C-alpha cells in the first residue's frame, strides 16, 4: 500500500524522466561522468552528465561512452555561460539526448528552441518564484528548485522555503524537482507530498562505489559534518560571483585570492565582465579537478552540500537508491497510520 503511494507520488516524475525512480543525480563536475551516470540510470534513477567546461568533442565522447554502459535514459547538464553552448546543444541533439538541464542563469536567446528542436525535454533551475514563472512562459518543460544547502553553486534561499514558495504555484503547471540538502528518504517523501515530481541529490552520490572520485576526496566527505560545508564569500560587489558551497580548506582561501586577482584585472581594464566571470568558472573547474581526480583535498575544491554529514561510507549506487526509497516508503506509512 505504502510503496504504491510512493510510486503514485513519483509517477509524474518517472513518466517525465522515463525511469523507475524520480531521483536525479545532480551534475557534479568531474564526478558525474560516464561511470556514475550509467550506474544511477541502471539502478532506476536518472543520471546526468556534468558537461561543465567540456569542449563539444569531449562531450561527444562522454555521451557515447555513457551510452555504451547503459541503455536507460540519462541527461546532460549544460552551463548557460559556456562560450560554445550552441555547439554543445548540437552534440546532445546528434546523440538524441532526451533531457537537457540548463544551469547558470536564464537560457540565452535561441537556446530553448535549439534544445527542443529534436524533441529533447528541458529542465531549468528556478531560484525564485518570479523566475520560475518566466521560465514556464518561455517553454521550459520542468523546473529544479535548489536551496542554499546544496553543494557547488548556490542561491541565497533555503530549500524548505523555496519549496513552500514555488511548489503550490508551479507544480500544477509542470513537473518540479526539489534539490539541496536532501540526504534521506523522509525528506523525499515530504517534498513529494508537497507536490514535487521528484528530487535531485548530488552529495549523497559523490562517494558512491561507482564514483571515480579519488579515495582522499571520499575520505574528506566521510569525516565532514554539515557545518564543514561552507559558502564562499563574494569580496567585490562588481564581480557577479555565485557563491559556492564546499568543505573548508586552503582551496577556499585560494578562491578569495583569485577574486582579488580578477577584480584587479577588471580595474586595469585587462578583462571585461564576461571574461572575469569565465576566469572564475575556470578556477572552479581546475580546483575541482585537483580534488576529485588528483586527490588534492587541501588545495582543491571539495564541493559538498550540507547533507555531507549523512555520507559516512562508500556504497553502491543501487543500495543508496534502495535505502532512500525504503526510508521514503516508511515515512509515508507512518504518516498514514
Image (cartoon, grey):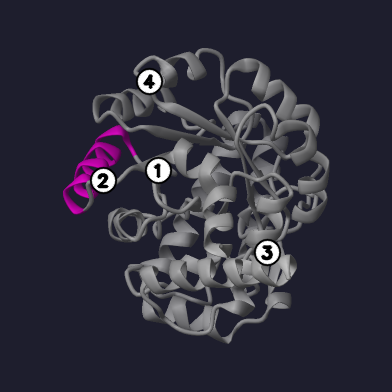
Q: Left or right: 123 with respect to 132?
A: left
**Residue contact at pointers 1 and 3, CB within 8 angstroms:** no
Residue at x-position 78% and y-position 52% = 235
| Residue at which label 3 appears | 187
Q: CA distance from mark 3 to mark 4?
A: 32 Å
Magenta stretch, main secondary structure class: helix
Q: Earlier in the sequence, mark 4 or mark 1?
A: 1
Nearer-the-camera pick, 89 or 329: 329
Which residue is more in the foreground, 166 or 92?
Answer: 166
Instruction: Choose the circle earlier in sequence order: 4 or 2.
Output: 2
Residues at badges 1 and 2 in contact (C-beta under 8 Å)? yes
The C terminus lies in which quarter of the figure?
A: bottom right
Q: Earlier in the sequence, mark 3 or mark 2?
A: 2
Nearer the observer, 240 or 88: 88
Residue 60 placement (x, y as % from top left): 24, 36
Q: Are marks 4 and 2 in contact (CB under 8 Å)?
A: no
Q: Residue at x 66, y 24 (%)?
A: 135
State which quarter of the image contains the N terminus: bottom right
Q: Earlier in the sequence, mark 3 or mark 4?
A: 4
User: Which span of residues is magenta-colored?
Assistant: 55-69
Q: Are marks 3 and 2 in contact (CB under 8 Å)?
A: no
Q: Answer yes or no: is residue 245 visible.
A: no
Q: Quadrant of residue 158?
A: bottom right
* Residue, disc 4: 119
The x and y percentages for residue 293 are 36, 67
Of badges 4 and 2, nearer the viewer stands: 4
- Circle 4 packing at 10 Å, graded few (<14), some (14-19), many (20+), is some
Q: Nearer the viewer, residue 176 or 330?
A: 330
The answer to whether residue 231 shows anywhere in this view is: yes
- The label shown at residue 62 is 2
Q: How far apart in space, not on screen, are marks 4 and 1 (Cα)?
A: 20 Å
Amino acid at each position: 500500500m505504502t510503496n504504491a503511494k510512493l510510486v503514485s507520488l513519483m509517477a509524474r516524475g518517472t513518466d517525465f524522466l522515463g525511469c523507475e525512480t524520480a531521483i536525479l543525480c545532480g551534475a557534479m563536475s568531474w564526478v558525474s561522468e560516464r561511470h556514475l551516470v550509467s550506474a544511477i540510470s541502471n539502478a532506476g534513477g536518472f543520471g546526468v552528465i556534468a558537461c561543465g567546461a567540456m569542449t563539444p568533442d569531449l562531450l561527444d565522447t562522454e555521451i557515447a561512452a555513457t551510452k555504451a554502459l547503459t541503455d536507460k535514459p540519462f541527461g546532460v547538464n549544460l552551463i548557460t555561460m559556456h562560450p560554445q553552448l550552441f555547439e554543445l546543444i548540437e552534440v546532445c541533439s546528434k546523440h538524441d539526448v532526451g533531457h537537457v538541464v540548463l544551469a547558470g542563469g536564464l537560457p540565452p536567446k535561441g537556446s530553448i528552441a535549439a534544445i527542443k528542436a529534436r524533441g529533447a525535454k528541458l529542465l531549468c533551475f528556478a531560484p525564485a518564484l518570479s523566475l520560475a514563472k518566466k521560465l514556464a512562459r518561455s517553454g521550459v518543460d520542468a523546473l529544479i528548485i535548489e536551496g542554499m544547502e546544496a553543494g557547488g553553486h548556490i542561491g541565497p534561499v533555503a530549500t524548505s522555503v523555496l519549496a513552500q514558495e514555488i511548489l503550490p504555484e508551479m507544480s500544477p503547471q509542470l513537473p518540479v524537482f526539489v534539490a539541496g540538502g536532501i540526504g534521506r528518504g523522509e525528506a523525499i517523501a515530504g517534498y513529494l507530498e508537497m507536490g514535487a515530481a521528484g528530487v535531485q541529490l548530488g552529495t549523497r552520490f559523490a562517494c558512491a562505489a561507482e564514483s571515480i572520485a579519488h579515495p582522499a576526496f571520499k575520505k574528506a566527505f566521510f569525516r565532514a559534518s554539515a557545518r564543514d560545508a561552507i559558502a564562499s564569500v563574494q569580496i567585490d560587489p562588481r564581480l557577479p560571483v555565485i557563491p559556492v558551497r564546499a568543505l573548508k580548506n586552503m582551496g577556499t582561501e585560494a578562491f578569495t585570492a583569485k577574486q582579488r586577482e580578477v577584480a584587479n584585472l577588471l580595474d586595469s581594464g585587462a578583462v571585461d565582465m564576461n571574461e572575469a566571470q569565465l576566469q572564475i568558472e575556470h578556477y572552479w573547474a581546475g580546483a575541482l579537478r585537483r580534488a576529485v581526480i588528483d586527490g588534492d583535498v587541501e588545495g582543491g575544491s571539495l564541493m559538498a552540500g550540507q547533507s555531507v554529514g549523512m555520507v559516512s561510507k562508500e556504497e553502491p549506487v543501487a543500495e543508496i537508491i534502495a535505502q532512500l526509497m525504503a526510508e521514503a516508503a516508511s515515512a509515508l506509512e507512518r504518516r498514514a497510520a
